[in-house]
Amino acid sequence: MPDLLANLNPEQLAAVTLPNEPALILAGAGSGKTRVLITRIAWLIQQGYASPPTILAVTFTNKAAREMMARLQALLPIDTRGMWIGTFHGLCNRMLRAHFRDAGLPQTFQILDTADQLSAIKRLMKGLNIDDEKYPAKNLQYFINNAKEQGLRPKSVDATDAFNRKFVELYEAYDQQCQREGVVDFPELLLRCYELLAHNPPLRAHYQARFRNILVDEFQDTNKLQYAWLKLLAGEHNAIFAVGDDDQSIYAFRGANVGNMHDFEREFRVRNLIKLEQNYRSHGHILDTANLLIANNSRRLGKNLRTDAGHGEPVRVYEAATDSQEAGWIVEEIKALINTGLARGEIAVLYRSNAQSRTIEHTLVNGGIPYRVYGGLRFFERQEVKHALAYLRLIDNPNDDTAFARVVNFPTRGIGARSIEQLADAARLYNCSMAVAVPYVTGKAGSSLGSFATLIAKMRAETQQMSLPETVEHVIRASGLAAHYETEREGQDRLENLQEVVNAAAAFVSEEGYGLDTPARSIPLRPGATAAPEIALATDDPGVDVLDAADLADPAQNPDTMTPLAGFLSHASLEAGDNQAQAGQDAVQLMTVHAAKGLEFTAVFITGLEEGLFPHENSAQETDGLEEERRLAYVAITRAKERLYLSFAQSRMLHGQTRYNIRSRFFDELPEGSLKWLTPKVEAGARWGGRPDNAGWGRDWFARPGRERSSSSSDYVNPDAGAPVPAFANTQRAADTGFKVGQAVFHTKFGEGMVTALEGSGGDARAQVRFKRHGEKWLALAVAKLQPVE
DNA sequence: TGTTGTCAAGTTTTT
DNA sequence: CTTGACAACA
């Protein structure tokens, strides 16, 4: 047996070897969090405190789950089968498949991704003649998902006004539609699974008895429903080992509730709170920068990272005149780094919003530097791939109207919007799916629809005994998709992607350990199978017996709970695939700060550190918005191992117009001693006549006198890039408009405010003003009665 | 039915 | 500026 505990620091060791009690591990960036989690599992098993089937480990992304599985297998000579390691959604899907009847779902239920869900909602609203202007489908989608993530069914939603009552009504209709079609959306997977356990005591008891050891990664990202689900599984006796970092909570906008950490500590009476503060990633100056910045946040659980690595290099700061000049400097610096022998893949350029990538990409192309952008379309989200999947879904479940509507006229077969509308009306009239309603539609439309129905039925019959890859291949041909893209001019890539779907199906079959000729649409019986056993409880059976570890070890006791096709379709929905372009070659990495979480690079550029961009202006409206932005900056900083660059630009092209920004307030929160300004640091007040320190973020920025300072510097020529940096660009603007950013103003209607941005000139000039009482507004200077205040 | 034009909007994102 | 959605056409 390997010595699992070798090379752990005292805190890590303490965490790994905690008794079987609720524990909260506050793991700072780069503190070996994943290692602790994995070693904990291995240690529990090695010591005989736990057997694999008692382990439930939850992550947020499939990537994290895969990494955990792989590292565990490398660490442990024992069998990791029987453990449940996966994402919240993946695990819930697995449980719902095993107990589909108890969950009130058809065996072939399918999963709607976000785009499918939106089109299902649009279809619903169209059918009910709802005005999309008044009730935008997107808003309804948000409303529904939000409610589900709070654990609320339509009945329980507290509708305060007529508008919300309409939403609740639509929410109910939507749920009914999903139920009729046999589909579930993402939050529904969790809520349905939660309810399954909550309403079924024997089942709950079974899983509680089984999962004695529950481990949760990235606990700060859990939402209310996920936390409730965990609590339910933990029951009275099971220990949850939660690992997280409140300082890296950057997903509040999608429902993550950092408060869960505190609630967990309280509700589970956590006695074991361990902080991992030893950082193994970054050099000292970088860490000091991160520490001092995040210290500005209130309501922290409290943590300070330290390193043995020494100070290392200072953090370099650069002020550019424009966004393109910023990009130019970045590219020059990257070239220099590459010349020192640094691999391109060890360099990352981070930005707050995707729109910023274009200028940088453009400059990299000109500089001949290979790069890779993260984000964008993923494999299973491509239209041709979704089309193929829709046919597969229809074969498996003819009631899936989302799939039906998607491909009924693709490739075109003369079924227009009118016919589809008629069909949808008929389906509503008979309360059935569109596929079932086809015979009720007569006339010419009826015959086209009839042949489509025949086509699907034919494909269903033909693929009855086919394996999954054969089924996929057959459907791509028989549906006419292949022929369609063969004739299309730009169809070559799409054809290749369709072939990739076949390959993905083959890979799926092999990874799941099915026989090559296992029919795609039957539950495989595989006596003596060696692949991961699934748990299947005969819950229709009144005498539910809790399976013990011995039962679970016997594959004969553990038949699969879904067909290969259903599994593949779930896989496609739950794991949309890679979202990075041009994978493979050594390239500079471009991504948003969000996408960088969990990654590390030798050299990191954080760009666009400007007020309004980072921190983002929209965050000002959100509660705790500024603190989340600061955490985001903290995450960005802690990605760097050896070299960190921070940059900002005086002017930036955004949405086709030049905006003049002031440097991010975050610069005032960094340790001056760890920074090296490559351009002279211009004191905050010098140029802008006062900074809007907490404007819009809830504090009163008017009551901050004495920050103004006069500037003594003149135009400065940047020695690095060789381009002149007009240090007073904005003041020049001021001559044109009569106003400048940072200036206090008075408006007869809105009262006191401060100019936060200026754009345009002459008669078109507009000023963005942050009013003390009325928030931020754009005002046309030619119209607005705006008076400067001394 | 596919194409063309107009118009509005434009943080962050995994499942 | 750039993209996506949708309405008006050929």
Image (cartoon, coloured by chain):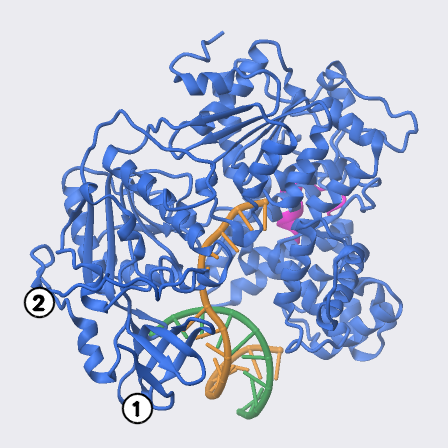
Chain colours: A blue, B orange, C green
- Looking at this view, name the residue that lies furthest to the top: A1
Q: Which segment is the magenta one?
A: A463-475
Residue found at x 37% / y 32%: A30
The count of marks equals 2
Drawn side of residue A23 relative to residue A2, left or right: right
Q: Main secondary structure of the magenta part?
A: helix
Kind of residue at disc 1 = Gly
| Pointer 2 residue | A715
Front one among A720 and A754: A754
Front one among A15 and A569: A15
Res A694 → quadrant: bottom left
Q: Name the mark on residue A763.
A: 1
Query: Residue A283 location in percent, x, y?
Result: 25, 33
Residue A265 visible in the picture:
yes
Q: Is residue A9 above or below residue A368?
A: above
Residue A61 magenta-drawn?
Answer: no
Dot 2 or dot 1: first in sequence order is 2
Drawn side of residue A364 relative to residue A676, left or right: right
Q: Distance between the residues labelled 2 and 1?
A: 29 Å
Residue A469 magenta-drawn?
Answer: yes
Query: Residue A614 location in percent, x, y?
Result: 35, 57
Q: Do the residues labelled 2 and 1 touch (CB within 8 Å)?
A: no
Query: Residue A634 location in percent, x, y?
Result: 36, 44
**Chain letter belonging to callout 1:** A
